[in-house]
Amino acid sequence: MTGHVVRFFATRNDHLAMLREATAGRSLHFLLAGVFDDQPIPFDDAAQIPGLGMATKGDQVHEDRYLVLPIEEPLQGREIRLNAGGTRIAIDQLANPKSVIFCAGGEWDGGSTIISGDVGTVSDDPSAKALWLAFAKPIKKKWRRVKAYYVGPEALAVLRGGGRLTTSIRSPALYNLAE
């Protein structure tokens, strides 16, 4: 397996503009990824995701991630048996090779801080790569590259206005993104 990933900083409006282009002509499901007691309910439009573009944990590693899958592809949940008994369902790319993972990151603390996000796939499946490219192209084409990240227009205004763009609120300021 090879991987493809684009890392970014973006606000809700940055995401909505990018997602309109990335999803144009595509019918997709967005499902919360992770391990659950019951299968999560899919969103057919990323704009329906509660809190899209608003970081809730303040750390990119812990922000919600969404499995993005063409609507015609059946979602495959992996059953995980617990040592204490019972089972859980894992929603991830391992059982869904035609998918990508989307983590929006977003605004924290009223918008003066923005937590990074990413979109990527670990799958070699041509459908997954095509879906990843659908997300990556508008990001790379319309957002500004700053070091290893792409920065949406509103997020760039936050950066230039003295705001903080970071992977975690716990990281020292030394690790903030700077132009």
Image: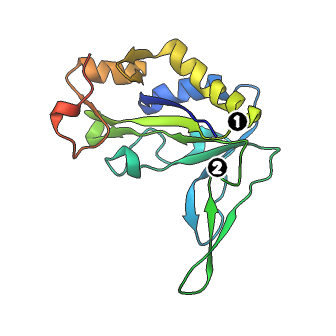
Residue positioned 60% across, 19% down in the render: 137
In-front residue for pair 74/153:
74
The residue shown at (36%, 24%) is 155
- Quadrant position of the C terminus in the picture: top left
The location of residue 151, given as percent across then percent down, is 40, 22
Q: How many marks?
A: 2
Question: How many angstroms separate mark 2 from mark 1 (CA)?
Answer: 10 Å
Lateral position of residue 32 relative to residue 155, left or right: right
Residue 19 found in image quarter: top right
User: Which residue is labeled 2 in the image?
Assistant: 93
In the displayed structure image, the side of residue 165 where residue 150 appears, left or right: right
- Which residue of the protein is positioned furthest toward the front in this rendering? 1
| Relative height, residue 177 to residue 34 (above, below) | above
Q: Is residue 138 above or below residue 122?
A: above
Q: Please, which residue is most extreme toward the right here?
A: 72
Secondary structure of residue under mark 2: loop
Q: Quadrant of the N terminus?
A: top right
Instruction: Please report contact status of discs 2 and 1: CB closer than 8 Å, yes or no.
Output: yes
The local secondary structure at tag 1 comes to helix
Mark 1 lies on residue? 128
Question: Coloured how?
Answer: rainbow
Q: Position of residue 122 (x, y in %)?
A: 60, 41
Q: Residues within 10 Å of mark 1 (few under 14, many from 20)?
A: many
